[in-house]
Image (tube, helix red, strand yellow):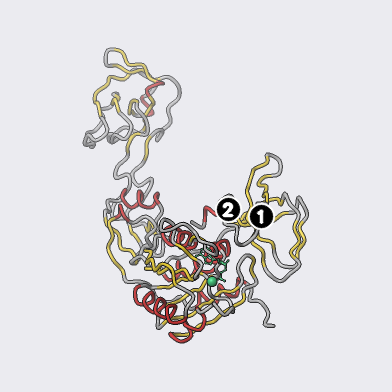
Amino acid sequence: MTPLLPVAEALERVLASATGTPPVQEMALLDALGAVLASDMVAGIAVPGEANSAMDGYALRAADATKPLPVSMRIAAGAPGGVFLAEGTAARIFTGAAVPPGADAVVMQENCLEQDSVVTVSGPVTPGQNIRPRGQDIEPGATVLTRGRKLRPQDMGLLASMGLSRVPVYRPLRVAVLSTGDELVEPGTAALRSGQLYNSNRYTLAGLVRSLGMTLVDRGIVPDDPAATADALAEAADSADCVISSGGVSVGEEDHVKAQVERLGRLDLWKLAIKPGKPLAFGRIGSTPFIGLPGNPTSVFVTFCLIARPFLLKLQGASAPALPTIQATAMFEVGNPGSRQDYRRVNLSSDPADGLQAHMFPNQSSGVLSSVSHSDALAIIPPGTTLAKGDRIQVILLDLLT
Ligand code: AMP
Ligand code: MG
C-alpha cells in the first residue's frame, strides 16, 4: 500500500503548478470587494490633504492660550482653508475643517468659554493638539497597497480616500463546480426517493468559490456514467479557469472521474493523510487545472479549504500567506493513532484565565455537515498523538476561510 500523502506535501505540489495570472482588467472600486490588485497602488495625493481639526472647538496659537482671545474667524468642514489666523485671536472651528495657517492647536469646545465673541480657554494647551496633520494617513508617493492584495472593505475605503474610483485587478477566476453522483437530487426540484439525497456540495462549493471573490460556473450534477462524466468535464474545462468536482474520485466501480480526466488530460490521484477526506484528484483537463474533491460533505469543505483554496488564490494572483493558526486549550480527549492529520470541528469559548478553549462538536463523521455549520474552527490533531483535556492545540478559524 502506498503511504498517504501529507497535506503539506500535496499543497506544495498543487501550488507549484499554479502558474500565471488571469488577464488584468479595470474594475469599479465599488465592485472590487475580494478582487486582487494587479499593480501596486501609489498615492498621488496626501491624505488628509491639509491639516484639519479633530474636534469641534477653537483653533489658536498654543502660546496665546493663557489670555482671552477675540474670535476672528469661523471655519466649518468643507470651507476652503488658507486664511491666516490673525495674531492674538482664535478661530471657531469644527471637526474636519481646515486649520488656518498660524494656528498650531485646537482646543475642544468643552474646555472653552465664549462670551461676546471672546474665548477663554481652561487647562494647558500643547502645540499640535487635536490637529490631524497633512499626510497623517497617507503620504503622497507612498505605496498604499501592493499587487496581489485581495481587497477588503477597509482597502476599498483607503483607495477611495486617495481619489480612486477604478482599480486594476486580475479578472476574477471562473471556477466550474460539478457534483457527481446518481444519488443526487437538486433541492427545489423533487422530493427524495429511496436511495437519493439532495446535492449539498454544489451549494457549499458555490459559497466557497464566491467568498473568494471568484465567479461560479455552475455545472450541476453529473451522473455516474463514463461518457456523461467525460462530456461534463470537457465542457466545464472549456468554460472555466479551473474545474472542481465532488465525489467519484475513489476507486469504486461507480467512480469515473479518475479514468475520464486521464483520457482528457492527466491526473494524479492522491490518498491524502487527512481526516476528513482522503482521496483527492489533481490534474488537468486539456490545459485547465482540475481538482477532484471527495464526495462526503464535510470532506469537501475541509479539502477545499486546505488544498483548493490556496491553489485558487495563487492562480488568482493573490499573495496569500499560509493560514494563521491560533492556540487553544483542548476541552476534550482524543487519540489519533493513525497517519492522517485530523481536522476536528470545534467551538471556541474564551476563559478569563485560560484564554481560548476548544470544545469538540459531538459528531465528527465526514457525512455530518452540521459539524461544520455549528463550529467556529478546525482543530488540528497531528497523526500519532493522544490529546488529554487541557492540552494546547492549534486551531484554524473558519471565518478566515470564507
Ligand atoms: P463518493 O466519493 O462519490 O463515493 O461519495 C461519498 C459520499 O458522499 C457518498 O455518501 C455520497 O452520497 C456523498 N455525496 C457525494 N456527492 C455529494 C453531494 N453533491 N452532496 C451531498 N452528498 C454527496
Ligand atoms: Mg459517488
Q: Check the image and name the residue furthest to the top.
A: 116
Looking at the rendered structure, the kind of residue marked 1 is Asn
> Which residue is outermost to the front?
194
In front of the other: 321 or 285? 285
Is there CB contact under 8 Å for labels 1 and 2? yes
Name the residue at 54% across, 82% down: 268
Q: Nearer the viewer, residue 100 or 279?
A: 279
What amino acid does circle 2 point to? Ser
What residue occupies the far bottom of the structure in this picture?
263
Residue at 77% over, 61% down: 386
Disc sitting over residue 374 in the figure: none
Q: Residues within 10 Å of mark 1 (few under 14, many from 20)?
A: few
- Helix or strand or loop: what does disc 2 sit on? helix
From the image, tell me which residue sits under label 2.
370
Q: Is residue 145 left or right of residue 372?
A: left
Badge 1 residue CB within 8 Å of ligand 1 = no
The residue carrying mark 1 is 363
Point out the tag, 1 or 2, that comes first from the N-terminus.
1
